Amino acid sequence: MKEFTWEAYDERRILICGSVNMCFMILGQFPGDYTETVYLCDENYAGMDYEEVLSQIEEKAVSQIEHSQLTPSIDSEEERLYLEEVRGYFEKLRRLKVKLLSGEEIGSFAGDYCILASRTLFNRYCKCLGYTSLEDFYSAVPILKTGYARMTYFGYLTTLYRRQKNGLYLGGVEINLTKRCTLRCRDCANLIQYYDCPERMDADVVVRSVKRLLAAVDGIAMFKLMGGEPLLEQEMMQKILSLPELSPGGKVLGIQIITNGTLLFNEDLLKLMRKNPLLGVLMSNYGSLSFKEQELKKQLSDFGVQYSEIAENDRWRNFGDPHKVYHDPEEASKLYNKCRSKENCCTVLDGRFYACPRAAHGDMLGFYPEPEGHVDLLGPEDELTLRAELKKFYYEYEATSVCMRCTNLTGDLIERAVQKTKKES
Ligand code: SF4
Ligand code: SF4
């Protein structure tokens, strides 16, 4: 794909193709003195008034910050600054001239700066523009590497939450519903490729651990249901999503179901999902491997469930072979403290709370010389003891032994979702 740069910009029209949210992130990086009209293509908002759409999205972002039961506990100065930042961002967007178009309306833009901000709708945009390949588009990635776009709403909150040491606010927590997956990615960062016919998890253990975790903490910025492939365990998912603690005004700010686009939701689950405005589905789109992607999107749209896709990035970071040692303990400790996984991806697996998925699955698989540190969520009967254990672990534990065996921050970028061959299995 071509790289869009402001240095090379020669005043041709700019069309951004993608979801409005992603397009807004890109618009946020436009120079403040840009006066031409920018065109956005998102079928869901086509023809609507830009100001109106902007107000809707701003209102949602601001009210999520202001009305969350959790924010009074967040240091008010930090919250004020964050709100100021969010409002300033929308203020900037308000100064731009923008027109929202449908696919049918973008045909005449071929040859202009057509920035692709959606992976899944690539074919659709190609068809509408008469393009044949990715080479015809400009990539959104260089623009999204800078500024506000790097700090998405939940990214900010997870960091902010971790700083609230007066309580127990967790950033992102991954609840593992299964070790099984419909794909077998050679470089799966969660080590799912190393399980040989894993057994199903005990739904009672999973649900009880979630309940105990929610009772012990003050808040969780992003509560993620994942696996393996979590859609293999829809009954279990339904039990978890029915917990009153996961309703708006409860202890979580956002719920995410992370799926690989190979399975569909059952109808009962969709009915439950649509009732919860905190919930969204995050789809990893692995091209032809995610063969249910279009059907899944239609299903979610039909039921009014929000969804988004993993950000435009064709490659994964190589986390390395968990059996090999890459760093000495001192270096590993530094890496742990830099790693965003400790903020975003604390992991609940088989009733245990771990620092990150690699720590959790590697421990289950017996990959490390010593048992990996964790908190037993079903251990201490009394909630205050569990809370104290979790707090100590969350703020003091360092997964050094695992980080010694991980190249999350140092590995190369590699092709995503390459499937293990029979020989490798
Ligand atoms: S689809 Fe996701 S969970 Fe499954 S093996 Fe691939 S990366 Fe791992
Ligand atoms: S093992 Fe360490 S470096 Fe690797 S993802 Fe986990 S916390 Fe991050």
Image: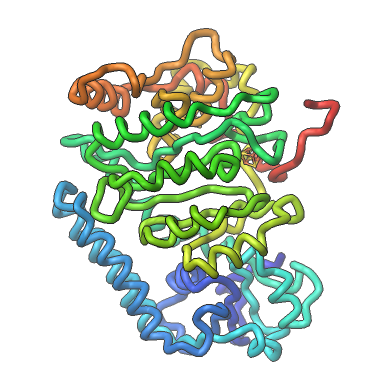
Q: Is residue 188 above or below residue 108?
A: above
Number of dots carrying numbers: 0
User: Can the viewer see residue 118?
Assistant: yes
| 344 and 365: which is toward the camera | 365
| 136 and 344: which is toward the camera | 344
Q: Is residue 93 left or right of residue 70?
A: right
| Residue 209: quarter of image | top left
Residue 422 placement (x, y as % from top left): 84, 30
Q: How is the image coloured?
A: rainbow
Residue 3 placement (x, y as % from top left): 65, 66
Considering the image in quadrants, where does the C terminus appear? top right
Q: Is residue 38 left or right of residue 13?
A: left
Q: Is residue 15 above or below residue 263?
A: below
Query: What residue occupies the far front of the structure in this picture?
Result: 268
Q: Is residue 51 above or below residue 423?
A: below
Considering the image in quadrants, where does the N terminus appear? bottom right
| Residue 128: quarter of image | bottom right
Name which residue lies at 29% across and 28% down: 395
Name which residue lies at 45% across and 38% down: 174
User: Can the viewer see residue 335?
Assistant: no
Residue 52 placement (x, y as % from top left): 37, 85
Residue 300 placement (x, y as % from top left): 54, 63
Query: What residue occupies the far right of the structure in this picture?
Result: 423
| 240 and 340: which is toward the camera | 240
Q: Is residue 131 left or right of residue 144?
A: right
Q: Is residue 5 left or right of residue 203?
A: right
Q: Is residue 76 above or below residue 119?
A: above
Name which residue lies at 60% across and 79% down: 9
Name which residue lies at 20% across and 20% down: 382
